[in-house]
Image: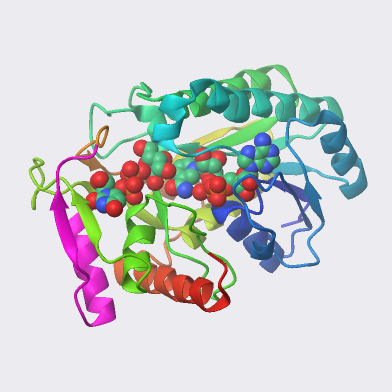
């Protein structure tokens, strides 16, 4: 497979930094643009060409395209906090939709042909069926999901009109960290279950809240499809290869294992990894949480030559825990 220079937007963030590492490991030339609003430069190797700035800065993006001879974009840059999107919807439409418009139109003008886009299970809202397949109605229930769906739509219409193809990858619950310990999730008030749980494991928190124990699920707590970040980014590389091989095709794929784990099952697994229990507090339901969110990954398995390598929840937790310990030992966050 011939590799072409890739621009990773949001490459100093959690998922983007793993994509940079995976692309480099596989021999792709990589550059990064990131405004460092939530990202951290130390998640990237020093020798990655790094441009600090906003993807909506057309002049900067044009310069990167020219200087790095970019042929494809992996677009991770965006704002990701669901409750914040409800409080500040216009910020989310600006940073996720309007900034993406600028990036896509700059790419089209520069003749860049392939875009892999970070979408989310939030585009489905409260899905009418679970496992959720890609044909389920897209009815987002918050501005975050709506802002991402609008970008998917822009890509779809642009691909019909210009020489461009795209992959919209809808992530379920991204978790874990680079198995080699080079990157992971950086704190700053994370609300994600696995991040919160490993913070408790290293003593940054004294307990984990369990939000809701009275759902119509086997043990009463919410069920999610946790996918290891390295498996997730591997699907991005496979998707990009496919876009290059088949320029007339686009891809819209869920990224998940098609497997559900409850909050209590995740915490039990962490207790097992640690060999001792983490303190839990049973709390009421958190607003806006669907009881059950599991992907159908049939399309992913049928379309890409992709296999899960790190699906075991204890593996996911071990990698997240190793990273949390590293953060703590370096006083990074
Ligand atoms: N983490 C998840 O569970 C999850 C789930 C579904 C989808 N996603 C999507 O994946 C992508 C990456 O998420 P993440 O978890 O790595 O978040 P993150 O906050 O760690 O990464 C986002 C990166 O983008 C940068 N950024 C934000 N706006 C920018 C802009 N306008 N120009 C340049 N840089 C900008 C930030 O500084 C950060 O480094 C996002 O688009 C998010 O919506 C994440
Ligand atoms: O301290 C915590 C944190 C979370 N939970 C529970 O754990 C489950 C998973 O919660 P996360 O916050 O880890 O993840 P979400 O399923 O809420 O969010 C995921 O889906 C969202 C869209 O629906 C966004 O895409 C988001 O980035 C992504 O992680 C939920 O039932 C939540 O209530 C707890 O019990 N205690």
Q: Nearer the viewer, residue 121 or 51?
A: 51
**Residue 318 in sight here:** yes
- As drawn, is 291 to the left or to the right of 218? right
Q: Would you identify the image quadrant in which residue 278 lies?
A: bottom left
Q: Residue at x 61, y 24 (%)?
A: 94
Q: Residue at x 19, y 53 (%)?
A: 210
Q: Quadrant of ligand 1?
A: top right
Q: How many marks?
A: 0
**Residue 75 in sight here:** no
Q: Residue at x 85, y 41 (%)?
A: 65
Q: Nearer the viewer, residue 318 or 200?
A: 200
Q: In x, y percent, where is residue 255?
A: 43, 46
Looking at this view, name the residue that lies furthest to the bottom: 275
Which residues fall within the magenta stretch?
Answer: 262-286
Q: Would you identify the image quadrant in which residue 156 lies?
A: top right
Q: Would you identify the image quadrant in which residue 56 lies?
A: top right
Q: In x, y percent, where is residue 22?
A: 63, 62
Q: Nearer the viewer, residue 308 or 268?
A: 268
Q: Nearer the viewer, residue 281 or 178?
A: 281
Q: In x, y percent, where is residue 141?
A: 35, 24
Residue 229 colored in magenta in the image: no
Q: In x, y percent, where is residue 324?
A: 45, 70
């Amino acid at each position: 497979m011939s590799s072409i220079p890739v621009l990773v937007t949001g490459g100093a963030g959690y998922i983007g930094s793993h994509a940079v590492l995976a692309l480099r490991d596989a021999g792709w030339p990589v550059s990064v643009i990131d405004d460092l609003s939530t990202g951290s430069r130390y998640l990237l190797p020093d020798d990655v060409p790094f441009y600090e700035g906003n993807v909506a800065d057309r002049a900067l993006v044009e310069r990167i395209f020219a200087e790095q001879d970019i042929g494809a974009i992996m677009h991770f840059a965006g704002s990701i906090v669901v409750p914040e999107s409800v409080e500040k919807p216009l910020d989310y439409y600006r940073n996720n939709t309007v900034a993406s418009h600028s990036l896509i139109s700059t790419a089209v003008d520069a003749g860049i042909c392939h875009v892999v886009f970070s979408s989310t299970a939030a585009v489905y809202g409260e899905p009418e069926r679970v496992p959720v397949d890609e044909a389920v109605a897209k009815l987002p229930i918050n501005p975050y999901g709506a802002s991402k769906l609008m970008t998917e739509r822009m890509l779809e219409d642009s691909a019909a009109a210009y020489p461009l193809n795209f992959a919209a990858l809808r992530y379920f619950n991204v978790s874990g960290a680079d198995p080699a310990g080079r990157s992971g999730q950086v704190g700053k008030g994370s609300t994600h279950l696995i991040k919160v749980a490993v913070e408790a494991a290293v003593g940054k928190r004294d307990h984990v809240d369990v939000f809701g124990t009275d759902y119509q699920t086997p043990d009463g707590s919410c069920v999610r499809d946790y996918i290891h970040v390295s498996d997730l980014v591997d699907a991005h590389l496979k998707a990009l290869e496919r876009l290059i091989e088949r320029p007339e095709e686009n891809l819209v794929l869920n990224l998940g294992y098609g497997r559900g784990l409850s909050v209590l099952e995740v915490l039990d697994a962490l207790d097992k990894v640690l060999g001792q229990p983490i303190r839990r507090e049973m709390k009421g339901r958190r607003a806006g949480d669907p009881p059950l969110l599991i992907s159908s990954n049939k399309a992913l398995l049928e379309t890409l030559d992709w296999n899960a390598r790190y699906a075991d929840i204890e593996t996911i937790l071990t990698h997240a825990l190793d990273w949390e310990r590293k953060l703590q030992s370096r006083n990074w966050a």
